[in-house]
Image (cartoon, rainbow, N blue to C red):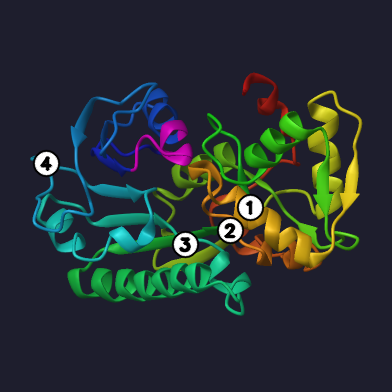
Amino acid sequence: MRQTRQTVLITGAASTIGSLLVPMLSERGVPVSALGRKRPEGPAGDAWHFLDLADKAADVPAVDAGTLIHTASLWLLPGWLEKFHARGVRRVIAFSSTSRFTKLASASPYELEVVNKLIEAEDHLAAECERLGMAWTIFRPTLIYGGAGGDRNVADIARLIRRFGFFPRFGQAAGRRQPVNARDLALACVQSLEAPASYNKAYNLSGGETLAYVDMVRRIFETLGRKPVFIPVPIWAFRVAVRFARLHPRFAHLTADMALRMQADLVFDHQDASRDFGYQPGRFDPAYLTTLR
């Protein structure tokens, strides 16, 4: 693929996806400027600039760029596109989530708030880019894992297994999942960067393997060198456990609805992405967990 020589701005450069994307672009000779509240622990591209997207009064650092890849929370982007446009940005790639579909019926006010913010931000991005003449692409990943352990999915399950030696199972936990590696998502950005077929479209990006929730957790046990131990838990007990777990900041995002979703199929087709820019995700391989504690 012909690589652009225009600078690419990456917001959320210290995020799970962003921290993988920065060196991936740099290795391909693409100039990168990393933006965020926190400097990436690894490579920061050609330059790193502090930018707090929650501060709407702030301005974009004085960097001329052709592309913005937004890996931070999508709902932070409204109010910024015109500022990026003034820096020369004419191409935007941003991450949303398939949660906008799977959590529409959630009983959790927090999850419903997130869903509404994602939907509103997606609509704003498409409309604002059209107004400004910017090509946009929205990626909606399924269950993200990998990177430096920043995910709140597989890594959290592994931490629970390491600490207690078992995993609580509600029902048969037979709902199907498609875990997607953060590295595959970073690569999707590279692949679609100059793929006109991906302009002005939204894509669901699922992993390359579909497996039952219980089998996903079983593979995590095996990767950690542990014998899989599942403890059946009634929903009332799961609710109590979640209430106590939420007292710890790392698990503040947990909800009791997670137990109910163990039974639900959260499956999405990524054929459009494969056709338009060659997206080919790998099977679920949580080997990175062996390096985390």
Amino acid on which disc 3 is placed: Ala
Note whether 101 is above or below 190 in the view shown.
below
Residue 147: % across, % down? 55, 32
The magenta stretch is: 12-20
Amino acid on which disc 1 is placed: Leu
Question: Mark 2 vs mark 4: which is more N-terminal?
Answer: 4
Identify the residue position indicated by label 1 in the image. Answer: 143
Q: Are dots 3 and 4 in contact, CB under 8 Å? A: no
Question: Mark 4 vs mark 1: which is more N-terminal?
Answer: 4
The local secondary structure at tag 3 comes to: helix
Residue 197 numbered tag:
3
Q: CA distance from mark 1 to mark 3?
A: 25 Å
Amino acid on which disc 4 is placed: Pro
Identify the residue position indicated by label 4 in the image. Answer: 61
The residue shown at (29%, 59%) is 76
Residue 180: % across, % down? 65, 47
Identify the residue position indicated by label 2 in the image. Answer: 273
Q: Quadrant of the C terminus?
A: top right
Q: Is residue 282 left or right of residue 57?
A: right
Q: Is residue 19 magenta?
A: yes
The local secondary structure at tag 4 comes to: loop
Question: Mark 3 vs mark 4: which is more N-terminal?
Answer: 4
